[in-house]
């Protein structure tokens, strides 16, 4: 087909023609299998409704003939008269049924060959029937004669009759096979034709797709590329398809017209922009000249403002810049206000309106530089603030901070500087004071105001202020020294109790330096092998029999000698060194106990920091495995204080340790935060009564009542109770009478280094 004719065919006509061809091929592919299916159905119906029923009828005829022959044979066998009569009647009935079936089958015959075969079979049947009826008639008079007559023609007539019926059956079977072969041939031809039409349809579809790609898709992609180029401003891009007379040609021509229009508009826009640019350039030059004048006069005004000559701060500008002059004055005013606000925010606390830590430090620096005869720094810490903030909310905490700030404002002199130093810390730099007495009076006034404002017996949000005071120049002649001294004094006030006030003294600095040195040395003590364990026996107070030993950590400092546990244990907990130290203590204690005889157990103290370790159960299990100590011979002692920070997590860790078979006892029960809720939450293995109750039990009835109550509580819970600090025979007798099952104290033995006297060899 010439290319010109192809280009004149529209896409719509091409698509419709292509789909018409596809439809015809698809219709042919569908109709041929349908025709084959109809022929197959017809043949199947012919087999099912004609051939098979006729074979069934022939089988019944043959069956009835066989029955008649069998009954005839039985009727001629020697027997009673009744039996002969019955078999003769059965023979007659089978012959009549066979006659009826033969007549019925003859009426349905259509095929000439089948009719010929069946007529021959009918003739043989009638001959056989006549002969059998004659035998039956003779049998009524003489069975012997009838039997002889039957034997004469029975084989010949019977075989001939069976053969003729089998011939009819064979004819029907052959007919059925012919129908099946014809159907198979039809199906095979239909499949071949359908496959051929499918191949043709695929070829036609491929040809249509190729034509669509060539005539539609590819030209459309080229047109789209030309449109994108036009959108990007490339108007020189060629537009394909202009010579076509179909839809693609129409789109190409429309796009070409748009291209010409866009080019025309672009030229007009370029000319307009050029004119605007020229006009703007002229205006810009004029504005630049005016701006130079304005900038020069504003610079003069700023110079005047900077020199303090506010009378010349208003620039004299041309009339058209009068608004700029007013705006300049307004902006300068706002700038001065903003500068004041920024300076205020930089030196004051937004919540309380007090100064901040930066203002306080700057004030101290200025005072130290001026070297006045006296001034003081008062540091305040708001006690219980974190708990109140958590329980009553941040709004209540903010109100509390504002109330404290107001108390400090009313108590301080107007010349004093009041500042909020941190979350719940405040400071007063007392400038208006002549000596320590004025400072002491100020601290007392503030303490009285706080006590009057919050009564702990009635107000759950009651707080107290701990106060630390440092004075100049006796406590330091630099700002850093004074601030450090005030912080040390506040720390000493915090340790002294609720709402205490402390002035700095030299001993505080010495104690702080000693604590820092001790904490530094503590970090190396484990590596330098300065720790060792002592073991104190735990006995039965009645028999003095040793039940176990408590492992006690000792530190022998190379310069300071023996350091009491009460001094270095808190430092180890605060620094985190207790984790490694505690693991070492556990391993050493278990290793030592593994060498002891019998079931003697070892008790090891666990700190609150260790109890927060999620892997503590794994550490205990690994230690038991490494040392070979049976779990039931290890007892871990904890105080209820260790459960306060993370109660649920700590109890979960203890449950895992208890599942190992390790015993867990509550140490110092009856002191600190002891409560029944801990005993209810976790099944401890033992209760240990603090030695303070044992020491006072002989002279203080309340202390003895507490011991009795703890023993009764342990008995009701099925827990043994151990009394600590038993040092005299009278105390042993008392704890034994009250029901303590175990005791510990100097009466039974002091804690001894196993290198000097192995626990396994000592007796209480």
Image (spheres, helix red, strand yellow):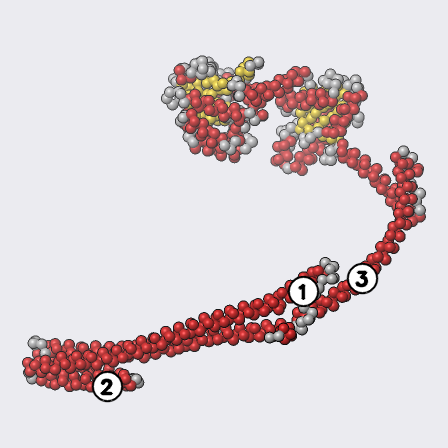
Residue toward you, 711 or 313: 313
On the image, the x and y values in percent for residue 715 come to 43, 27
Q: Residues within 10 Å of mark 2 (few under 14, many from 20)?
A: some
Seen in the picture, residue 310 relative to 230 is either above or below; the reply is above
**Drawn side of residue 178 relative to residue 337, left or right:** left
Residue to which mark 3 is pinned: 267
How many marks the image carries: the answer is 3
Quarter residue 357 falls in: top right
Query: Can you see residue 688?
Result: no
Residue toward you, 244 or 125: 244
Query: Can you see residue 754?
Result: yes
On the image, the x and y values in percent for residue 663 come to 44, 28
The quarter in which the C terminus is drawn is top left
Residue to which mark 2 is pinned: 119
Q: CA distance from mark 2 to mark 1?
A: 87 Å
Seen in the picture, residue 318 relative to 120 is either above or below; the reply is above
Residue to which mark 1 is pinned: 223
Judged by depth in the image, the label closer to the viewer, 2 or 1, is 1
């Amino acid at each position: 087909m010439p290319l010109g004719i192809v280009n004149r065919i529209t896409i719509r006509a091409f698509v419709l023609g292509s789909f018409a061809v596809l439809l015809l091929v698809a219709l042919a592919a569908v109709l041929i299998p349908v025709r084959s299916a109809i022929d197959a159905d017809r043949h199947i119906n012919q087999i099912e409704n004609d051939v098979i029923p006729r074979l069934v009828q022939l089988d019944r005829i043959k069956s009835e003939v066989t029955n008649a022959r069998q009954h005839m044979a039985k009727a001629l066998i020697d027997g009673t008269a009744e039996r002969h009569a019955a078999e003769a009647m059965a023979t007659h009935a089978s012959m009549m049924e066979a006659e009826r079936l033969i007549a019925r089958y003859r009426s349905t015959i259509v095929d000439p060959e089948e009719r010929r075969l069946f007529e021959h079979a009918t003739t043989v049947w009638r001959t056989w029937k006549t002969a059998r009826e004659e035998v039956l008639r003779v049998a009524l008079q003489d069975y012997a004669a009838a039997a002889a007559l039957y034997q004469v023609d029975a084989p010949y007539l019977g075989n001939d009759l069976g053969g003729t019926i089998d011939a009819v059956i064979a004819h029907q079977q052959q007919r059925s096979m012919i129908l099946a072969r014809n159907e198979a041939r039809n199906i095979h031809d239909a499949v071949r034709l359908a496959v051929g039409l499918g191949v043709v349809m695929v070829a036609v579809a491929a040809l249509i797709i190729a034509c669509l790609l060539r005539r539609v898709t590819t030209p459309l992609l080229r047109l789209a590329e030309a449109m994108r180029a036009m959108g990007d401003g490339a108007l020189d891009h060629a537009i394909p398809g202009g010579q076509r007379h179909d839809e693609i040609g129409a789109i190409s021509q429309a796009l070409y017209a748009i291209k010409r229009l866009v080019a025309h508009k672009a030229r007009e826009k370029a000319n307009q922009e050029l004119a605007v640019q020229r006009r703007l350039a002229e205006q810009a030059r004029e504005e630049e000249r005016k701006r130079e004048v304005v900038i020069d006069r504003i610079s003069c005004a700023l110079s005047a403002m900077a020199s303090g000559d506010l009378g010349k701060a208003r620039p004299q500008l041309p009339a058209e810049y009068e608004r700029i002059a007013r705006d300049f004055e307004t902006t300068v005013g706002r700038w001065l206000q903003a500068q004041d606000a920024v300076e205020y925010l930089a030196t004051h606390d937004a919540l309380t309106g007090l100064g901040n830590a930066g203002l306080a430090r700057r004030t101290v620096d200025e005072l130290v530089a001026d070297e006045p005869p006296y001034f003081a720094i008062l540091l305040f810490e708001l006690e219980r603030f974190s708990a109140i903030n958590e329980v009553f909310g941040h709004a209540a905490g903010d109100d509390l901070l504002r109330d404290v700030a107001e108390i400090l404002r009313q108590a301080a002199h107007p010349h004093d500087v009041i500042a909020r130093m941190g979350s719940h810390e405040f400071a007063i730099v007392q400038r208006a004071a002549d000596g320590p007495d004025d400072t002491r009076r100020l601290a007392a006034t503030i303490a009285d105001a706080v006590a009057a404002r919050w009564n702990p017996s009635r107000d759950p949000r009651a707080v107290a202020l701990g106060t630390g005071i440092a004075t100049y120049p006796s406590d330091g002649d630099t700002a850093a020294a004074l601030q450090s001294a005030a912080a040390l004094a506040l720390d000493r006030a915090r340790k002294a109790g609720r709402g205490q006030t402390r002035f700095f003294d030299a001993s505080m600095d010495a104690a702080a330096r000693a604590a820092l040195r001790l904490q530094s040395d503590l970090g190396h003590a484990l590596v330098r092998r300065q720790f060792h364990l002592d073991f104190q026996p735990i006995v039965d107070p009645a028999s003095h029999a040793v039940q176990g030993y408590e492992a006690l950590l000792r530190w022998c400092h190379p310069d300071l000698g023996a350091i009491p546990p009460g001094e270095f244990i808190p430092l180890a907990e605060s620094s985190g060194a207790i984790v490694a130290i505690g693991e070492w203590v556990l391993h050493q204690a278990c290793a030592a106990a593994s060498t002891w005889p019998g079931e003697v157990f070892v008790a090891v103290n666990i700190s609150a920091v260790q109890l927060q370790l999620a892997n503590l159960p794994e550490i205990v299990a690994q230690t038991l495995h490494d040392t070979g100590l049976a779990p039931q011979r290890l007892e871990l002692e904890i105080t209820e204080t260790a459960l306060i920070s993370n109660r649920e997590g700590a109890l979960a860790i203890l449950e895992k340790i208890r599942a190992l078979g390790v015993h867990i006892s509550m140490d110092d029960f009856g002191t600190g935060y002891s409560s029944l809720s801990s005993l209810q939450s976790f099944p401890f293995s033992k209760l240990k009564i603090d030695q303070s109750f044992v020491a006072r039990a002989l002279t203080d009835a309340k202390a003895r009542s507490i011991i009795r109550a703890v023993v009764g509580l342990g008995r009701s819970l099925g827990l043994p109770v151990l009394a600590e600090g038993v040092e005299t025979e009278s105390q042993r007798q008392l704890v034994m009478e009250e029901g303590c099952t175990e005791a510990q104290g100097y009466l039974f033995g002091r804690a001894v280094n196993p290198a000097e006297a192995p626990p396994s060899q000592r007796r209480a």
